[in-house]
Image (cartoon, helix red, strand yellow):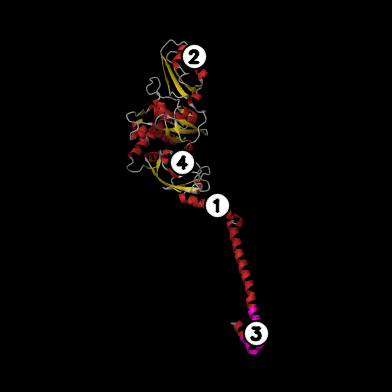
Amino acid sequence: MNQNRGLNLILHKKGGIIVAFLIGALIGLFFTGRPDKGYEESSSSKTVSQETQEKTGTTESQAEGQTADSDQADSQAENKLPDYMYDANIKGLTSENPATNRLEYKEALSYLVMNGIESPVTVYVNGLGAEDFKDENKYINTTFFKATKNDFDTNQGKVVSVRVSYAFNENYYAYMNVMNGDPIPEGEDRAEQIAEAVKAFLETNINDSMSDYEKEIAIYSYLDLNNTYYHDDPFSKGDHHEVYGALVNHVAVCSGYARAFYLLATCCGLECDLVTGRGINAGHEWNMVKLDGKWYNVDVTWADTCVEDFDYVDYSLGYLNLTDQDMIDTGHTWDARAYHTADSRDYNYHYLQGRLFQYDEFCRYVSENLYYGNLLECSVTDFDMNRYDISGIVKYYGYRGTWNWRVSNTSTGYCTIYIYLY
């Protein structure tokens, strides 16, 4: 109001050039003040921004890191997995650290499911194609859950997400009951029976003083001593394919043995896996166990069946902790991309017993132990049916009694041999 009054007074007293000059001066003065005011606003805004950075500890140089953190947070948010659950050693949990093979994918999937992330879960992969997910239940561990559906982005050569729907089964409910005391859902009577069988096994066979290797032997022996292989029609559907068959009915085929082994081993705190592959002429399942940082193959089924009609031993210990090459020698095949590598014999049973031989050592072992009523048991790594003439070797070293013998397989390479002298 004061400014308008002054301008009217000047215009009344002066005219012509003076009036024009004064009007121009006033207008110029008015507008030349604007940058100063604008500069002050800019300075004020910058000061507020600096204060915000000081309070949050954020600077412009951190923008790139913030973006990466934001991307990772988005990845984590999709699975709703708390930050503290993230394990940098497990690939596939975030888009920044994708799984690059079937093994890494399988481990990420199992990690998410067993940590309680609701279906569907998301695994990030790079280098895997749609064909890797057509029938993934063949190579993931399905003891506790099965994949029911997956949505795969077919954009090859880039990090893509795989959204996997899954469903728990009776073994999972039994496991959670044994380990955490979780109530078994209503109507899951078979899970109740499985849980009771596991608890009975743990109470009778396992104690805190045992090593992982001793626990493994206890599981291996229990399953072989308390099960009969189902010969009637092993490929038919039925409980003999399930944990229920091995732990409750005590009649099983390979999948029942192997899944029961996995359940018991996991309840004992062992790191274990289920392997789906083939035996000599048919589909087959067995296990892998990790001991002191190394993986080993364990075949509880063949341990039972290779000597089932040999009256002098209940089960073979020759299938306890084999290398991959040993398994190949005995007729096993599988997709190695989905499993760990086993290349150590440190915990092979006969190696620890001092009875893992090659031909000359085997002959010496036989010659030194030809006693009436003796059971000779060992494994060899260079078996060949033509060279290992068991009866000829026993005769050569002068045994005058009767004997019976059995080999665990007739392939070339790793083999377990039993000779009973009577």
Circle 3 SS class? helix
In the displayed structure image, the side of residue 242 where residue 369 appears, left or right: right
The residue beneath circle 3 is 20
Q: Earlier in the sequence, mark 3 or mark 1?
A: 3
The residue beneath circle 4 is 106
Measuring 61% from the left and 64% from the top, which residue is drawn there?
46
Kindly indicate whether the residue at mark 4 contacts the one at mark 1 (C-beta within 8 angstroms): no
Q: Which residues are magenta?
A: 8-28
Q: What is the quadrant of residue 240 in the picture?
A: top left
- Report the front residue among 129 and 372: 129
Residue 415, placed above or below residue 81:
above
The image shows residue 356 at horizontal and vertical percentages of 50, 23
Residue 163, placed above or below residue 337:
below
In the displayed structure image, the side of residue 53 where residue 244 appears, left or right: left
Q: CA distance from mark 1 to mark 4?
A: 25 Å
Classify mark 3: residues with Cα within 10 Å, few (<14), some (14-19) or many (20+).
Answer: few
Q: Earlier in the sequence, mark 1 or mark 4?
A: 1
Q: Earlier in the sequence, mark 3 or mark 4?
A: 3
Circle 4 SS class? helix
